[in-house]
Image (cartoon, rainbow, N blue to C red):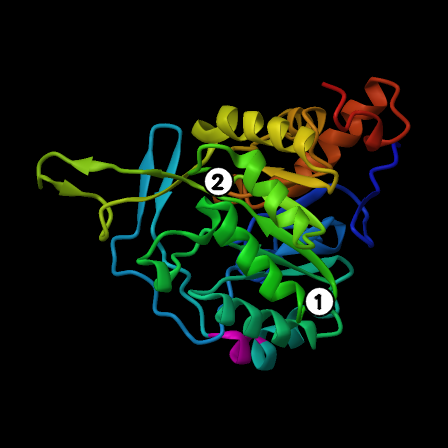
Amino acid sequence: MADLKIKIGNLDFKNPVMTASGTFGYGPEYADFFDLNGLGGIITKGTTVKPREGNDYPRMAETASGMLNCVGLQNKGVDYFYNHIYPQIKDYDTNMIVNVAGSSSEDYAACAARVDEMERIPAIELNISCPNVKEGGMAFGVTCEGAASVVKAVREVYHKTLIVKLSPNVTNIADIARSVEAEGADAVSLINTLMGMSIDIEKRESRLSIGTGGLSGPAVKPVALRMVYQTAKAVKIPVIGLGGIMTAEDAIEFLMVGATGVEIGTANFIDPRVCAKIILGMNNWLDKHGCQSVNEIVGCI
């Protein structure tokens, strides 16, 4: 069997396969389907300083090659996470990574500092696609200045592995990646969802309560591949690729264009065992092609 071990920052992963935030709950929800300890990492659903109700329903809509969502970071806040979720997940033999979100640099930093205290959480993924309330709702991640400001604030208080999740809704994602690398990010993950819409022509209205939502699934994969390819060539830190990965072959494409690791998202809704299948399929492909280590194919294109 090929060696699937990878490294991101100072953090060791038993394989490159992680779950994408918002598609896997906190982890235990999927424990009946396969052994979660076999994953490289689990990235929890988004966590904020204070509880958030999320957006009104409807907030999900299927599309021809994926899905739209406008859930709106519904969660019970970082204190609830510490008291009720952390005890359930801290003993899994995999990297438990908390996705951190906020509406201001101060919010992000406060949440990250709280997670920093949790001994068994070795990393966070910073979701900088959240609206910056001080700038009229524009997402932090769509400008170099906004992205850098959040990472700088978090880096001052967070001392473990810091992954920054990038928005694809930008002109040049490589510039954003370089700006967060300069402020101390240990890795970047991309892409987050693309903005989209779906219309009910009988009701003459959007199928989502707030009009637009984030598009994920196979439809976004070609865009995600291109952005991962560009970003991997622009930064020295590891890149984690996601966006429409449904099979081991999809995951291998991301590794070949420069991703060190991958995240599986929408596919979890279709097949709750898909991550385990992708790990096995990746190993089979590497064996078939005479590769001793998964790292042999990273960035080979």
Measured as percent of width and height from the top left, residue 86 is found at 64, 74
Q: Which residue is mark 1?
A: 121
Residue at (61, 27) in percent of width and height: 230
Residue at (53, 75) in percent of width and height: 78
Residue at (57, 79) in percent of width and height: 84
- Please tell me which residue lies in front, 167 or 138: 138
Residue at (82, 31) in percent of width and height: 294
Quadrant, the N terminus: top right
Residue 264 vs 105, above or below: the answer is: above
Question: Callout 2: helix, strand or loop?
Answer: helix
| Amino acid beneath label 1 | Ile
- Please tell me which residue lies in front, 219 or 231: 231
Measured as percent of width and height from the top left, residue 113 is found at 63, 74
| Amino acid beneath label 2 | Ile
Which mark's residue is nearer the viewer, 2 or 1?
1
Measured as percent of width and height from the top left, residue 145 is found at 50, 51
Which region shows up in magenta?
77-81
